[in-house]
Image (cartoon, coloured by chain):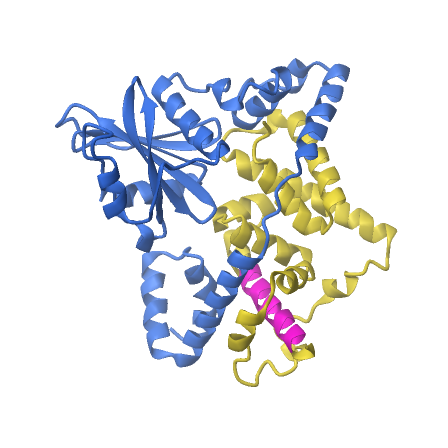
Amino acid sequence: MDCARASELLHGYLDNELDALHVQEIEAHLETCASCHGEYEQELKLRSLLQVQAPRYVAPAQLRSRILGSVRAARRARSLREWVPMGWLQFGGALAAAVVLSSTVTYYSVVVSNTDRVADEVVASHVRSLITNRPTDVVSSDQHTVKPWFNGRVDFAPLVKDLSEQGFPLVGGRLDYVDGRPVAALMYRHRQHWISVFMWPDQPGKDTATRRFSMSGYNVAQWTSGGLRFYVVADMASPELGEFVAKLRS
Amino acid sequence: MLPHLDAAYNLARWLTRDDQSAQDVVQEAYLRALKFFGSFRGGDGKAWILAIVRNACFDWLKQRRAQDLHEPFDEDIHTPSPDHPGRATGSAAGNPESSAVSSITAERLGSALERLQADYREALVLREIEGLSYKEIATITNVPIGTVMSRLARAREQLRKRLHLKREET
């Protein structure tokens, strides 16, 4: 690989968007070329500067009420049914539900695009943990702190994996209640995304393939392995969720 | 609760560079979204709403440019092309960024980012602040994935240059 090609691919590499073959090529080039390696280091610095220093603006509270007010006004002029012929799906479902129902009813509890009650419960739990700013009871990125914390709190040994090297640092764990029983919930992070991993005992020897679907705008993955039943909930795009699940299952 | 409102506002705030304008544009975009919800065929709801928000922002930017030819940031629409990086004086003299990075404040970074042309700024905001993948950014901005990568490359190059220029002024 020459330097022109390397600088073309550098950004894809930096953003973790290259396939394995190109990653190998560019890593080999970076090892031997000091100038491209210097370029790469500068980009890394710029990136961490941006991620640490550039603000993510949060929508002001009055914007929410302004939008809901204007939607209501528009709705008076025209019936909502005409506007939303497709029914309750993801965005429209959430938006329409927010308008139709009082604002005290949170949207995840009314938007059900799937009859899987348990999936509904875990998505609700994920959302609730983020809304209440209390995603974890034990805050630690160390699997050897998080795992023992569950001793005596649940009657099984949860799977706690350190995936920080793969870009999914562990944030912590909490106790939750799903499907009529206490379950272990772990929280991971990936860039701006939060990932909840729920697990509880299932019949041993009943390992299944991963089933993926989306619910209320969240992507969900579900499987059983090693006698535990897993649900993963995140607002990440499906391929990234797939990558996370693959790392967790490997 | 309105889905993805923070992401929508953040994008609009960076593109319009103004709180009130961002609120106006987001409000309009959400009304538009509800109206055209029939055209939503499932898939990534976040990308769908962000695409509507960014289109509303670019409409706003166009209107505003037509109204006010003396837009303060207009000079920056015509930034030097990557083939002629000559304006960034001293960029060839060693690697001055290494010392600059630690001294750059959030304010300085924000203002340098705000002065990038809108499509570069948009790519950086979606990638670095919103944490989206190339594919998601490509969907939102309606360009091929390869264009996302080259825009990010140019955006970062220009941002580095701007930060470097500022450093030399002080």
Of all residues shown, which one is farthest toward the front? Answer: A152
Give left or right: position of A185 versus B10: left
Q: Position of residue B134 (x, y in %)?
A: 49, 51
Q: Position of residue B43 (x, y in %)?
A: 49, 33
Which stretch is magenta?
B150-167
* Colour chain B is painted in: yellow
Q: Is residue A211 visible?
A: no
Q: Residue A21's image quarter?
A: bottom left
Quadrant (top left, top right, bottom left, bottom right) of the N terminus of chain A:
bottom left
The picture's colour for chain A is blue
Q: What residue is at 48 percent from the left and 26 percent from the top? A: A216
In the displayed structure, does residue A214 sit left or right of residue B36? left
A197 displayed left or right of B19: left
Decide which of B153, A143 is in the foreground and name it.
Answer: A143
Q: Nearer the viewer, residue A198 or A140?
A: A140
Which residue is at a point 41% across and 61% down the rendered structure image? A13
Task: Give the number of marks.
Answer: 0
> Above or below — where is A118 with respect to B80?
above
| Residue A217 percent across, percent down from the top left | 48, 30
- Quarter-wise, where is residue A145 in the image? top left
Quarter occupied by residue A22: bottom left
Q: Residue furthest bottom?
A: B93
